[in-house]
Amino acid sequence: MGCMTNALDTIWWHVYPLGATGAPIRDRTGDGSDAAPRLRQLEPWLDYLIELGCNGLLLGPIFDSVSHGYDTLDHYRIDPRLGTNEDFDWLMSECQRRGINVMLDGVFNHVAATHPLVADGLAGSTNWEGHEDLATLHHDDERVKELVTDIMKFWLARGIAGWRLDVAYSVPPAFWADVLARVRTDYPDALFLGEVIHGDYVQIATDGTLDSVTQYELWKAIWSSLFDENFWELDHSLTRHAAVCEAMVPNTFVGNHDVDRIAAKVGPEKAILALAFLMTLPGMPSIYYGDEQGFQAMRGEGFSADDPVRPPLPATPEELSDLGAWIFREHQALIGLRRRHPWLTRAKVEVLDKTNETISYEVTDGADKLLIEAWLQPTPGVRVSSGGETIYAMPAEP
């Protein structure tokens, strides 16, 4: 078995399994004919994940659901479109053999409106955020607390490293504090990452006893400063990011299953700058599948708005287009830089200089130090230096 990494020190490859495996999402037959062991299709991508430089697999929703996975029907059962619990156990064993941490996406704010919990009085139709097909769990009910605790332990017992908590911001912090305390009694090292978009990240994490939260402010500042050519925005965000990092190790990212592809938003070259920021700033970074190949897609409108950014993968990595090979190599280089400087997870950051089109900042743990310089004109570029020596540059220096 490979050596497993502390969860907060993991670099995650984030996959939306229903999309990546080509499972039917909108047009379901209802007769079970769409059932297939599609989770096993991810096995060829585990070595790809390692070749990329990651050491964790963050799986989007995999539990039995009505459509897109965030409308759960049974938290104890793998969605038949992805296989069975035994297929999951097999995939877990393949990850463990390679030393890959696994995190699951848990939807504990709401369930499908047709979930049995609604009939049992443990969830109610509340038209949560305009979704009439979802029912919000009654988080003040002791039975709900016991149920969520049991679900978390059920899958932690199968070897996962932790949970991404979907829309954690909508769940009362007291619920998280109560449930996570119960889970940590048996699994003290489990990681709990809360999805938080707006609000006081530190307060939400503290009140809910979350280990980490999604750093959407930094994501917004990275792509927006590159798109608008205004590094003053990134500078402002880094001040706030530094304060967040004093309290926790946030999940940093430039792409996920809910946002436009970074390469489509700012272009491939600027996307590498975004990655350079991601890999040199403190936090727990995740790479959304396909970003390392320069996949391009923008979210659409309506019920299927997210489908374009949740595409199927080919059967094997060898079938990927050669067009993304250079972007993959840049990802390897920058993720490798991150792996060689593990102190970056908890580093301090200080912006040294900035204009609209240039920025330089320093990251340090007190003993080691890196200097990052980025520019947008005449062509986008970035340089990472250590002790006056360039250790990464794009474009490559002679």
Image (cartoon, grey):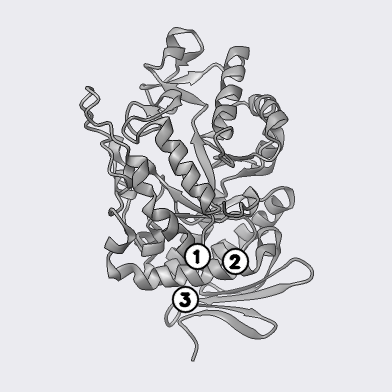
Q: Earlier in the sequence, mark 3 or mark 1?
A: 1
Q: Which residue is mark 2?
A: 338
Name the quadrant containing residue 111: top left
Mark 2 or 3: the one toward you: 2
Q: Give the residue at x 41% y 49%.
A: 259
Distance from disc 3 to disc 1, alpha carbons, whole Å, reads 14 Å
Q: Are marks 2 and 3 in contact (CB under 8 Å)?
A: no
Q: Nearer the viewer, mark 3 or mark 1?
A: 1
Give the residue at mark 1. Answer: 275
* Left or right: 219 in relation to 131: right
Q: Quadrant of residue 86?
A: top left
Front one among 204 and 175 = 175
Residue type at mark 2: give it.
Arg
Dot 3, crowdedness within 10 Å: few (<14), some or many (≥20)?
some
Label 2: how many residues lie within 10 Å, few (<14), some (14-19) or many (20+)?
many
Q: Nearer the viewer, residue 224 or 373?
A: 373
Give the distance between the C-alpha atoms of the residues marked 2 and 3, in whole angstroms.
23 Å
Residue drawn at x 65%, y 76% as measured from the top left? 371
Q: Could you tell me if the residues under marks 3 and 1 are in contact, i.e. CB atoms within 8 Å?
A: no
Residue 144 at x, y percent in the picture: 57, 17
User: In terms of secondary structure, where does tag 3 sit?
Assistant: loop
Instruction: Left or right? Give the position of 241 relative to 292.
Output: right
Q: CA distance from mark 2 to mark 1?
A: 11 Å
Residue type pointed to by label 3: Leu
Residue 281 % position (x, y): 62, 63
Residue behind mark 3: 376
